[in-house]
Amino acid sequence: MSTRGPALFSAIGKKATDLLNRDYNTDQKINITTYTETGLALNSGLANNGGLSSGDIAAQYKYKNVALDVKADTQSNVSTMLTVTDILPSTKTIASIKLPDYKSGKLEVQYLHEHASFTTAVGLNESPAVDFSATIGTPAIAFGAEASFLTGSRVFSKYNAGVSFTQHDSTASVILADKGDSLRASYVHQLSRLNGGAVVGEVNRKFSTNENTLTVGGSYVVDPETVVKARLNNHGNLGALLQHQLTPKSSLTLSAAFDTKALERHPNFGLALSLKP
């Protein structure tokens, strides 16, 4: 698919969200991935959260421009996703369903153009929800909007709008979400003094409750195999993690969460081990 134009609407603000939330966890997780000579990837995962254990097994098969993903978990859910790239130039088609919910089927089409990108997703049931989004602009500046329409009740369940600005070492975005009830602004800046790390700031404003949440964070590259991250918001929630690459594809992540306004409480710790050949 072409990447010369603006990204999809879902990419607006994603860099800040990933830096502030990705890899933070308070569970104990292990994921093991293996590959066969035919190109089949098998992944098994096990997690423990507060004494409750869960697991899943997933398989992915790729052939030319087609990818098939199947995942089953210990709650008897089976998710299937078929992705086909470039049926038409610059398009990606995704068909998915999660069993035993037969009404969860969805068909999505993504289209990336030099100056615009579009997505349309339709539920495969009697009264489907129709999701659509669009962005216009360039890789440096993009304006976008998304909405979800419920055909059964004939109402919009969601509509959001956003704008993003991207330079070689920084990204800023503003998103008006929750039908205009919330505003999220974020800024990410890469710093060479952090060995390729970054600093991030995000402000969330909830108009109906007059509530503001300010979160700041950053990452620091200790060495080519080790990264540390931290985040703190104005409610006193502090998080930190250390991620070490055991091999080029395998990693160990240790994370912790603290409530700085209630230090008498025990902090929460998480561990995630990902093993790939």
Image: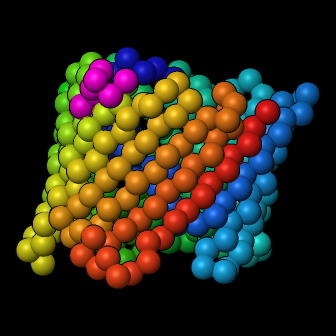
Q: Across the whole image, how many numbered discs are drawn on residues?
A: 0
Q: In this view, does 253 lie above or below 115?
A: below
Q: Position of residue 209 (x, y in %)?
A: 12, 78
**Residue at point 53% right, 43% down?**
243
Q: In this view, does 199 lie above or below 1?
A: below
Q: Which residue occupies the extreme front position in the image?
A: 264
Between 235 and 75, which is closer to the camera in this rendering? 235
Between 165 and 101, which is closer to the camera in this rendering? 165
Q: In this view, does 191 lie above or below 18?
A: above
**Residue at point 17% right, 58% down?**
214
Q: Which corner quadrant of the image does residue 129 belong to?
A: bottom left
Position of residue 55 in the picture relative to residue 120 (left or right): right
Confirm whether residue 98 shows in the render: no
Q: Which residue occupies the extreme right position in the image?
A: 37
For the C terminus, give its image quadrant: top right
Between 185 and 123, which is closer to the camera in this rendering? 185
Confirm whether residue 25 shows in the render: yes
Q: Which corner quadrant of the image does residue 136 belong to?
A: top left
Residue 217 is covered by the magenta coloring: no
Q: Where is residue 14 in the image (x, y as percent from the top left)?
A: 35, 43
**Residue at point 28% right, 23% down?**
193
Position of residue 265 in the picture relative to residue 102 (left or right): left
Q: Position of residue 275 (x, y in %)?
A: 74, 43
**Residue at point 66% right, 80% down?**
51
Position of residue 191 in the picture relative to residue 210 (left or right): right
Q: Where is residue 119 in the image (x, y as percent from the top left)?
A: 42, 42
The magenta stretch spans which residues? 189-195
